[in-house]
Amino acid sequence: MNANLYDIFAARFPQDRTACCIETGCGRRYSWDEMDRASARIASLLASLDLPHGARVAVQVDKSPEAVMLYLATLRAGLVYLPLNTAYRAAEIEYFLNDAQPSVVVCSPANADWVQPLADSAGTRHVYTLDELCGGVNRGTLLDQAASHADRFDTVQRQADDLAAILYTSGTTGRSKGAMLSHGNLSSNALVLRDYWQWQPDDVLLHALPLFHIHGLFVACNGALINGSKMIFLSRFDSAEVVRQLPQATVFMGVPTYYTRLLDEPGFDRAACARMRLFISGSAPLLPATFTAFRERSGHTILERYGMSETAMLTSNPYDGMRLPGSVGKPLPGVAIRTANAEGHACAVDEIGGIEVRGPNVFKGYWRMPEKTAEEFTADGYFRTGDVGRFDANGYLWIVGRSKDLIISGGYNVYPKEVEAVIDDVDGVLESAVIGVPHADFGEAVVAVVVLEPGAGAAVGEAGIIAGLKEKIANFKVPKRVHFVDELPRNTMGKVQKNVLRSRFA
């Protein structure tokens, strides 16, 4: 049996293929048949390139239905999809291309002038551009090239263990790691969530998330596709536009920042949510105050869940049952989760320990990093998530922190070492420490604490450092504030005490 994720989707598309699959915020509509035919043309183009088995297709494009077509086409062609954050700059893209060595790179037309030489340098033979349709005209060379290819394509046979996607997730050392996800990983998670969240035949997903993130692509899109559900596609989150579209939708997924901003929107009330069935939050902790205020305002109780790039979704508050503010719920069916103490022994109820997981959704390992992969798994096959938490007496998981210094700001992961390396390269900076502090909108805000070289003085300021960083790294990684100190606090081993800094600058 073919385990290719696309065939698993296609088997569950609605019988009426003329029905709407994706509708954009501006009213453009794409039927299921159009999505099938368009993705077939792109898959035919990819197949004509005679790429090696397991070839990667790296994609850094703006969100659009056409980007979904490319994702589906990559699956259909049996290739490996590699989404990249649209905020990444040249130095970041250069690393990903050299590490993943993709056979195909697809970028937005606006970035082609600097992506092309990076792809050439990395040995990528095929570079295309892709933008959404504008006035009925294809914008980009990918759709131009695909137009002459057949609109019927036999999905390439794949086994459940075959690689379907690579998602890069940074490490505390600053070197990004490519999490390898198989067709089986992604299909098992999508099927479990379809049942657990009780997707309905008439559900409509209001999609405001980015497509380069596991949340927007492998939870939201895959969830709608595997249920044959229409998506209303917003190019980005805009609280006023979300409120305008809510009466046409039944399901909404967002990061906590989305929910705080909806609560600031005057038009957001129970009437706007009258048709809604489910609001889901993830990618960062949801504040209990937001949980309570949202329920009072909308009449809906947000369902919070927990997952990560290496595993897709792991736990969820129940669809039917108590949804607890601050808890990420119970393990999903088929997923085993335990908390372990420093000695590796299982924790008792309410005892805090490292969260370890096992299941069909857990990734194959890190791309070309076998030693790191082996290090992150226990002898009995559990993946060490790096998160710390506890189970209560009712089996609900409560995440209390992270064993690493990961910052989650607005749903995006920020790894301090990467930002610190860029700050430390600024003339006049001796050293820096990057921390996350509580923020009502973003959950956590990135903050830098900087020690200047003797004599640097006023030559280096907060505004200058922030402006310089915006040219070098993605905007969500740039500190909201920069504080200057004479020295960083350290313990007896010389390690910077970031807990002291977080307390001081919170």
Image: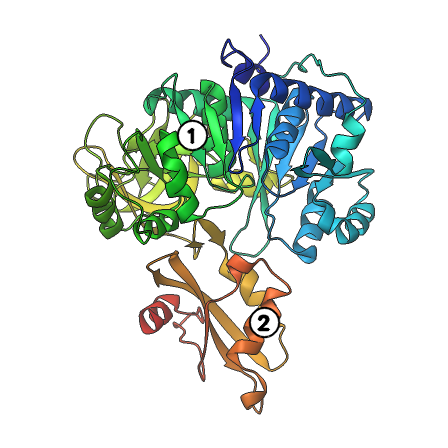
In the rendered view, does 93 fall on the left or right side of 270? right
Q: Disc 1 marks which residue?
A: 205
- Inspect this view and state whether residue 12 appears: yes
In the rendered view, does 176 fall on the left or right side of 229? right
In the rendered view, does 19 fall on the left or right side of 283? right
Residue 479: percent from left, percent from top = 49, 66
In primary-sequence order, the first of circles 1 and 2 is 1
Q: Are marks 1 and 2 in contact (CB under 8 Å)?
A: no
Residue 237 or 479: which is nearer the viewer?
237
Residue 455: which quarter of the image? bottom right
Residue 472 or 397: which is nearer the viewer?
472
* Residue drawn at the location 48% of the way across and 51% of the way down: 413
Q: Residue furthest left?
A: 393
Amino acid type, mark 2: Ala
Amino acid type, mark 1: Leu
Residue 92: percent from left, percent from top = 65, 54
Residue 46 or 204: which is nearer the viewer?
204
In the rendered view, does 278 fall on the left or right side of 297? right
* Residue drawn at the location 77% of the way across and 26% of the way down: 146
Residue 443: percent from left, percent from top = 36, 55
Q: Disc 2 marks which residue?
A: 467
Residue 281 or 22: which is nearer the viewer?
22
How crowded pointer 2 is (Cα within 10 Å; few <14, some 14-19, many 20+) is rated as few
* Residue drawn at the location 76% of the way across and 48% of the way down: 112
